[in-house]
Image: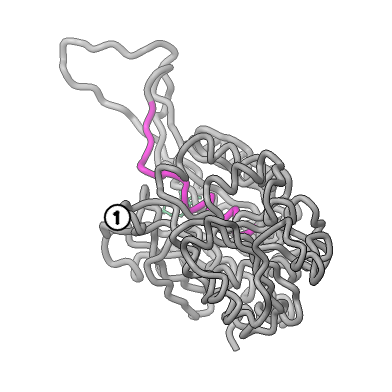
Amino acid sequence: MNSSTSNLQSLVSKRVLLGVTGGIAAYKAAELVRRLIDVGAEVRVVMTAAAQEFITPLTMQAVSAKPVHTSLLDTDAEAGMGHIELARWADVILVAPATANFLSQLAMGQAHDLLTTLCLASIAPLAVAPAMNQAMWGNVATQQNVAKLRERGVHIFGPDAGQQACGDIGMGRMLDVLDLRLALAGLFEVGVLAGKKVLITAGPTREAIDPVRYLTNQSSGKMGYAIAQAAVDAGATVVLVSGPVALVAPQAARTLAVISAEDMRTAVMAELTGTDLFIAAAAVADYRPISVSESKLKKDATKTLSLALIENPDIVAEVAAQPVRPYTVGFAAETENLLGYAQSKLERKGLDAIVANDVSSELGGFNSDQNAAVLLYSDGASQSFEMQSKSKLARALIIDLASKINSTCRNQ
Ligand code: C5P
């Protein structure tokens, strides 16, 4: 049994109230019901009026083998299982798909139909799987609604990136049914990193040349941020040391914003005590100007400018060399001889593991939302991860690393 199958045990006998709202991904809700029942969950379905335009209550009744709830003010339904009873019945409410409109209603605390009323009336954990056009997902109104919901403790599953029903490509696809099931199971289990402190570096560093210029690189920080979110979801206490990026940090992580490699090194060293797992996902500049000009450099007649550079501290190697140190994981972003270079980096820096990723491919790499990787361990073990969204890859990496760390601890 692999780790993802064993995680599903936590859904046995769990009462899942599945809310379905009106988006094209509603057709996947029938499959979701089946897959939840497969692993022993009890499922009851609530559909909004718009959802019934995409998939019929009869279909949902057939797959769940239970009456489907569609109306707040239906005397027959209230005589069976009324809305308050239904709210109390649920161990968890999952709304999949959750449209932009539904997220907005939820953020406002509306109770104008059965599903919104149940969400308001239930004390069960609430999870939503957003699914919408990429522009609707990116709209600041939706983002603000999602941020508000997250702040209130609503679990946001996805969305995923990829091809959309409308032909667009981008963020907004509902998470795959099996990933949703896994995420839901995660709510009921003690996270694989519960009780652990995880320190993560992410993003690029900026090395000042003068007050207005700097050296930097292409790193977007997306992989490191996705790893921070995955570690939070796995129950860890997360400290994220981040170079300058245009990303929103996971709410539950403690984020330390830094600029240069030296700042990053100082922040990491100050946080090492008590750290169980250190993941160096940052693209740290290897060199910095020897001296930073106090005033803006001027052009001169020679038409050339030489910059003298000095090597930056290698943060991950320094962590790995500490007498008492966390399990230390580096990244190797390579454009050729991926595994060879990654293996030698693993050895040279004295790491426990290294995530090798090919940044020359068109799909994965620095600014992409997707990535593929190979995880190499110092004991010779390795694990390959196919091209997938960075959030999925981050979850898979965390699960693999956690099982390695947990088994290493048990064997000591
Ligand atoms: O040697 P290279 O830069 O390719 O190694 C990449 C790995 O080393 C990454 O994990 C990166 O975060 C880490 N690194 C570091 N400090 C540096 C350079 C790289 O921690 N100065």
Q: Residue at x 47, y 57 (%)?
A: 23
Q: Residue at x 66, y 48 (%)?
A: 239
The location of residue 207, given as percent across then percent down, is: 43, 31
Label 1 CA crowd tier, 10 Å (few <14, some 14–19, many 20+):
few
The location of residue 380, given as percent across then percent down, is: 48, 80
Disc 1, SS: loop
Classify residue 274 by image quadrant.
bottom right
- Residue farthest toward the front in the current orientation of the protein: 75
- Residue for badge 1: 167
The residue nearer to you, when weighing 230 against 297, is 230
- The stretch drawn in magenta includes residue 229: yes
Residue 235 visible from this viewpoint:
yes
140 relative to 332 in the view: left or right: right
Report the magenta residues as a range.
Answer: 214-231
Which part of the image, by quadrant, shows the C terminus?
bottom right
The location of residue 305, given as percent across then percent down, is: 24, 22
Q: Amino acid at mark 1?
A: Gly
Q: Is mark 1 within 8 Å of ligand 1?
A: no
Q: Residue at x 53, y 35 (%)?
A: 141
Q: Is residue 369 above or below residue 384?
A: above
Which part of the image, by quadrant, shows the N terminus?
bottom right
